[in-house]
Image: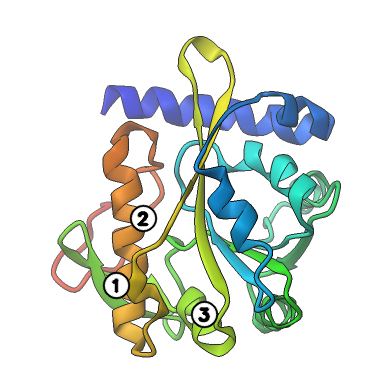
């Protein structure tokens, strides 16, 4: 728990660095790459590529590097603070990235991008609204899980790959890792696909639990656990 809190604080400070500095600053800190050919192959799919990026490590630092390789359309939740929203949106949309809000307009933009063979990015472990999810296992607990990723996969037949960005020891930079997803992600059965996405994220977290953003209220809505964060 102590190590995770340290990582959480580091992530917050790193966010301000990557948002405030030129994109080259973040790109130059990407020192190691693992299985990156999986990503490079996926973005060539004529049916488009959906990149899932969980709340793990420092995903913000990875955005400029990803935008070098593609022109991603990224879904984001606008900040209630207007000045902060403008600052973050401008920082995230530098280079080739396009940001779309978490609403019907944003969903249509992601779908259009995939159907045209482009790249869309989603954080799959967001807690969705009441009409945007189903209950699915996550570390043995049935939690409310978003269906958007699975719906996009089912409608487009796109390639899917998971990316993560973890810090290296002694502040020497970051490593980007590409991972395949559980094959059941491609299932036509929605609950099966959603559960497979959770398993894919779980597998990443088990690799290094300290790097996950446990402060994000992932267990806010559960079938069996109540008021976890009170």
Label of residue 204 in the image: none
SS class of the residue under badge 2? helix
Q: Nearer the viewer, mark 3 or mark 2?
A: 3
Label 3 SS: helix
Give the distance between the C-alpha atoms of the residues marked 1 and 2, in whole angstroms.
10 Å
Task: Give x and y (percent) for residue 111.
Answer: 67, 81
Q: Earlier in the sequence, mark 3 or mark 2?
A: 3
Residue drawn at x 81%, y 52% is 93
Residue shown at 71% from the left, 40% from the top: 65
218 left or right of 152 in image: left
Left or right: where does residue 24 sit relative to residue 206? right
- Total count of labels: 3
Query: What residue is shown with label 2?
Result: 201
Q: Quadrant of the N terminus?
A: top left
Q: Which residue is mark 3?
A: 153
Horizontal arrangement in the rendering, residue 121 relative to residue 207 (left or right): right
* Residue identified by numbered label 1: 195
Q: Position of residue 91 (x, y in %)?
A: 80, 43
The answer to the question of whether label 3 and label 2 lie on touching residues, with beta carbons closer than 8 A, is: no
Question: Relative to residue 212, is residue 128 depicted above or below?
Answer: below
Mark 3–mark 1 Cα distance, whole angstroms, equals 14 Å
- Kindly indicate the quadrant of the structure image that contains residue 145: bottom left
Q: Earlier in the sequence, mark 1 or mark 2?
A: 1
Disc 1, SS:
helix
Q: Residues within 10 Å of mark 3 (few under 14, many from 20)?
A: many
Taking the image as drawn, is residue 176 in sight?
yes
Q: Earlier in the sequence, mark 3 or mark 1?
A: 3
């Amino acid at each position: 728990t102590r190590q995770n809190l340290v990582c959480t604080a580091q992530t917050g400070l790193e966010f301000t660095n990557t948002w405030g500095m030129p994109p080259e600053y973040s790109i130059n800190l990407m020192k190691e790459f693992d299985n990156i050919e999986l990503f490079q192959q996926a973005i060539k799919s004529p049916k488009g590529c959906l990149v899932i990026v969980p709340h793990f490590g420092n995903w913000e630092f990875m955005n400029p590097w990803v935008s070098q390789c593609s022109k991603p359309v990224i879904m984001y939740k606008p900040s209630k603070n207007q000045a902060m929203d403008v600052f973050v949106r401008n920082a995230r949309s530098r280079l080739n990235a396009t940001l779309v809000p978490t609403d019907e307009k944003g969903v249509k933009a992601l779908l259009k991008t995939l159907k045209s063979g482009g790249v869309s990015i989603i954080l799959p472990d967001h807690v969705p609204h009441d009409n945007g999810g189903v209950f699915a296992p996550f570390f043995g607990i049935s939690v409310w899980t978003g269906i958007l990723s699975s719906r996009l996969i089912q409608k487009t037949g796109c390639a899917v790959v998971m990316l993560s960005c973890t810090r290296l020891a002694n502040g020497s930079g970051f490593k980007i890792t590409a991972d395949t997803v559980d094959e059941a992600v491609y299932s036509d059965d929605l609950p099966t696909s959603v559960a497979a996405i959770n398993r894919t994220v779980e597998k990443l977290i088990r690799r290094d639990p300290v790097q996950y953003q446990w402060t994000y209220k992932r267990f806010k809505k559960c079938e069996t656990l109540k008021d976890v964060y009170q």
